[in-house]
Image (cartoon, grey):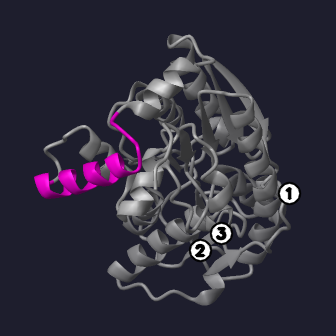
């Protein structure tokens, strides 16, 4: 079967049964893969009517110097630095950024990506994507680079990804609490961000297991599942889950994100629980609210601006026909005043 120049790297990867980065390396004669694999992939590409850089040349000829950026909501401070990072790199390259929101709805997300494609943007960056393999056929019709940032799809390995290591971050947060002497540590999570919540919960459980700490199921609370398109404010979720977790015997809690942690802290304040004297709290993200909370929040810093920059750089590499690999960035612990050695909660 012969294809036009619109054949993409992902088409070749699907036919060859390998990853996108492997195809990209083969087409660039990279020594990182064996000669046998390079030749095999190059033959497949040739049989499909694709030659190295053909797609990039086609894209270059139709450049509009614009990219689409898709986020779930503008109300979540998590996305602010990602947007800033994308825009900073785009400005350097003379590229305009068009922003759209999905309200956590995967149907709306795929429609927006398709709309951007029809408007001939040079590429699309999608933050916290909800689309999965059920949308694969529609995505295959999109012949521009698509970068998934911190994707929330369990199976959505469609094109390229730039992500933060959620598991490592959770391990750091829980280890910090254990080092302070806590043994009864709770986890508060969300139901509408499947991948990141799963990875952070796994980091929490793995760290407790390695420290021979048995977990009481009552220590783990996940909010009720919401319908697609429904925006549940994390602060409100934190208030609700905080009320539930205070019924247990924990002395510390690791929260899915900073805004949930802020909600927990507000509930503690209303219930007369002092932080960190009677409850240590750790968040995840390190957004601007951490330092204005009282006490300032100990959290896991996500390099959000950097990940936005990396995603934009990946778009530019795709357009130039350069080798592009998925990116996984490590977060790090930021210790502030919301954590301390465990106290007697009855005091």
Q: Residue 186 shows which numbered tag?
A: 2
- Between 281 and 50, the residue placed more toward the observer is 50
Tell me the CA gap for discs 3 and 1: 22 Å
Q: Could you say which quadrant of the image residue 266 lies in?
A: bottom right
Looking at marks 3 and 1 on the same chain, the residue that comes earlier in the sequence is marked by 3
Q: Residue at x 25, y 46 (%)?
A: 26
For the C terminus, which image quadrant?
bottom right
Q: CA distance from mark 1 to mark 2?
A: 29 Å
Quick check: 240 above or below 234? below
Q: Secondary structure at mark 1?
A: loop
Label 3 crowding class (10 Å Cα cut-off): few <14, some 14-19, many 20+? Answer: many
As helix, strand or loop, the secondary structure at mark 2 comes to strand
- Name the spot of residue 109 as percent of width and height, x first: 75, 49
**Stretch of the chain drawn in magenta:** 34-52
Q: Residues within 10 Å of mark 2 (few under 14, many from 20)?
A: many
In-image side of 279 versus 177 (left or right): right
């Amino acid at each position: 079967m012969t294809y036009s120049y619109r054949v993409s790297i992902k088409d070749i990867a699907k036919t060859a049964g390998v990853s996108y980065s492997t195809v990209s390396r083969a087409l660039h004669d990279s020594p990182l893969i064996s000669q046998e694999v390079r030749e095999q992939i190059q033959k497949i590409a040739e049989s499909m009517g694709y030659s190295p850089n053909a797609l990039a040349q086609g894209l270059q000829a139709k450049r509009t110097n614009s990219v689409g950026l898709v986020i779930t909501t503008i109300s979540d401070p998590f996305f602010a630095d990602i947007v800033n990072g994308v825009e900073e790199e785009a400005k350097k390259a003379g590229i305009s950024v068009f922003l759209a929101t999905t309200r956590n709805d995967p149907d709306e997300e795929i429609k927006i990506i398709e709309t951007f494609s029809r408007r001939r943007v040079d590429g699309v960056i999608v933050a916290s994507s909800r689309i999965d393999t059920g949308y694969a056929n529609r995505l295959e019709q999109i012949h521009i680079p698509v970068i998934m940032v911190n994707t929330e799809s369990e199976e959505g390995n469609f094109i390229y990804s730039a992500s933060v290591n959620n598991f490592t971050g959770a391990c750091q947060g829980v280890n910090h609490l254990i080092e302070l002497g806590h043994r009864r540590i709770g986890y508060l999570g969300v139901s509408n961000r499947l991948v990141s919540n799963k990875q952070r919960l796994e980091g929490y459980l793995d760290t407790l297991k390695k420290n021979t700490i048995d977990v009481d199921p009552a220590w783990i609370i996940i909010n009720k599942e919401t319908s697609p398109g429904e925006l549940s404010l994390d602060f409100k979720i934190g208030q609700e889950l905080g009320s539930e977790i205070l019924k247990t015997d924990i002395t510390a809690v690791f929260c899915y994100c900073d805004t949930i942690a802020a909600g927990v802290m507000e509930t503690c304040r209303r219930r007369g629980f002092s932080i960190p004297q009677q409850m240590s709290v750790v968040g995840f993200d390190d957004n601007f609210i951490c330092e204005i909370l009282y006490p300032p929040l100990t959290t896991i810093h996500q390099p959000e601006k950097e990940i936005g920059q990396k995603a934009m750089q990946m778009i530019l590499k795709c357009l130039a026909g350069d080798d592009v690999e998925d990116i996984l960035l490590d977060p790090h612990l930021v210790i502030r005043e919301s954590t301390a050695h465990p106290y007697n909660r009855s005091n």
